Amino acid sequence: MNLQLLEQLFKTNVQNLGLLSDNWNSKYM
């Protein structure tokens, strides 16, 4: 397994989750 690739995917997922929660907060707060 390529650890760097996994780390990259993980970081991207975290960023996407952050963007989603930001959008949610601006809509419903």
Image (cartoon, rainbow, N blue to C red):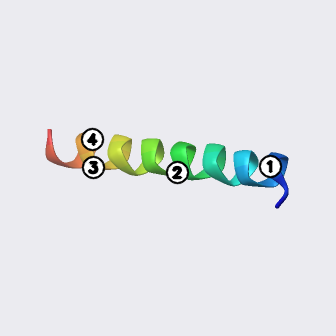
- The image shows residue 11 at horizontal and vertical percentages of 64, 43
- Which label belongs to residue 28? none
Q: Earlier in the sequence, mark 4 or mark 2?
A: 2
Q: Tag 3's secondary structure?
A: helix
Label 3 Cα neighbours within 10 Å, binned few <14 / some 14-19 / many ≥20:
few
Tell me, yes or no, whether the two marked residues, 4 and 3, touch with CB atoms within 8 Å.
yes
Comparing marks 4 and 1, which lies closer to the viewer? 1
Give the image location of residue 7, x and y in percent.
72, 45
In the visual, does 17 lie left or right of 23? right
Instruction: Name the residue rendered at 52%, 51% in the picture.
Output: 16
Q: Label 3 sits on what residue type?
A: Trp
Q: Which quarter of the rendered picture does the N terminus lie within?
A: bottom right
| Residue at (15, 47) in percent of width and height | 28
C-alpha span from label 4 to label 2: 15 Å
- Along the line of sight, the residue nearer the viewer: 12 or 22: 12
Badge 1 local density, few (<14 within 10 Å), some, or many (20+)? few
Dot 2: what SS?
helix
The kind of residue on which mark 2 rests is Asn
Which residue in the protein does label 1 denote?
3
| The label number, if any, that marks residue 24 in the structure image | 3
Q: Which marked residue is nearer to the observer: mark 2 or mark 3? A: 2
Between the residue at mark 1 and the residue at mark 3, the CA separation in whole angstroms equals 31 Å
Residue found at the far front of this picture: 1
Q: Residue at x 36, y 40 (%)?
A: 22
- Tell which circle, 1 or 3, labels the residue nearer the N-terminal end: 1
Cα separation, mark 2 vs mark 3, equals 12 Å
